[in-house]
Amino acid sequence: MARYAYVNGRYVDHREARVHIEDRGYQLADGVYEVVGVRDGRLIDEAPHLDRLDRSLKELRIGWPVARSTLSFVIRELMRRNRLRDGLVYMQVTRGVARRDHAFPTTAVKPALVLTTKNTKRLDLDPGAGIAIKSHPDIRWERCDIKTVALLPNVLAKQAARESGAYEAWLVDGEGRVTEGASTNAWIVTPEGELITRQTDSGILAGITRQTLKKLAGNLQLKFVERAFTLAEAKRAREAFITSATSFVTPVVRIDGDSVGDGKPGPAARRLREEYIRFAAAGELVT
Ligand code: PLP
């Protein structure tokens, strides 16, 4: 079956999909993106993802490449063409194509829009064995709240994690506090039973899964607190887990080689994963 990508108004064969070499996303990482999860042909949390896209664009003063309703249509059309059941829709907007110069183009340039989809294995209710984390210094800029395609520090952290046998990296600031994962938000459950994730400010990306889980966590007998936690605290935690549009809720069982809790996925992470998967089942059916 042919796989399609959407590139600036056209659905094209994924293998042939191209952008111009002077696209500012390619040369300057001058662009933003979004990833929307898909489960059983249903889009998860489309509206908040598009709200965040709108915010990222505004922060960088990039215009919408098409109307929001058109983007929603393109998302669905691409899912249909690619028969996407489980996986993700990736969308990227850059400032457009212009002669290379750091400053914004002075002539009107149309923002460039690219969408792809990716099939992934359908995530089980059962999280399996859980994942290992490797800590890594957070060397990113001070606007991590913007979902930009400038991801080199995240790339290097993720690669260091993978080379050490871990699945995800947790980024640690100068004071020893975990900010977030390379591509996920970080959570712990303290020995006292508090559910903790870092407050949202310009130091992390405000995850949409994080936001939804915050609402779902109300069903659990845990006190929810938004604050920074240190790596040392995470290692002493009863449980730890990550969240994102593609990993949903995934338990963390090791941090830098040390077991978290009893080294197995804990009850809060399991329960929240189930709640999130139930929530995903209420999304709009597309394919
Ligand atoms: N933090 C970072 C740095 C990310 O790249 C992501 C997702 O890609 C997240 C957190 C999780 O955000 P979301 O739940 O919206 O996928």
Image (cartoon, helix red, strand yellow):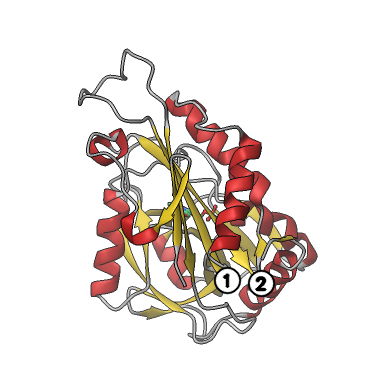
Q: Is residue 281 above or below residue 132?
A: above
Could you tell me if residue 261 is visible in this image?
yes
**60 or 8: nearer the viewer:** 8
Measuring 77% from the left and 60% from the top, which residue is drawn there?
Answer: 218
- Label 2 Cα neighbours within 10 Å, binned few <14 / some 14-19 / many ≥20: some
Instruction: Assess whether mark 1 and mark 2 are in contact (beta carbons under 8 angstroms).
Output: yes
Q: Which residue is rendered at x = 73% and y = 55% of the image?
A: 215
Q: Is residue 232 above or below residue 112?
A: below
Q: Whole-Å distance between the Cαs marked 2 and 1?
A: 6 Å
Q: Amino acid at mark 2?
A: Asp
Q: Is residue 227 left or right of residue 230?
A: right
- The local secondary structure at tag 1 comes to loop
Work out whether residue 187 can be spotted.
no
Where is residue 239 shown, x and y percent of the image? 55, 74
- Looking at the rendering, in which quadrant would you find the C terminus? bottom right
* Mark 1 lies on residue: 86
* Viewer-proximal residue among 257 and 182: 182
| Residue indicated by mark 2 | 40
Instruction: Give above or below for 25 relative to 175.
Output: above
Rendering quarter of residue 176: bottom left
Q: Nearer the viewer, residue 213 or 110?
A: 110
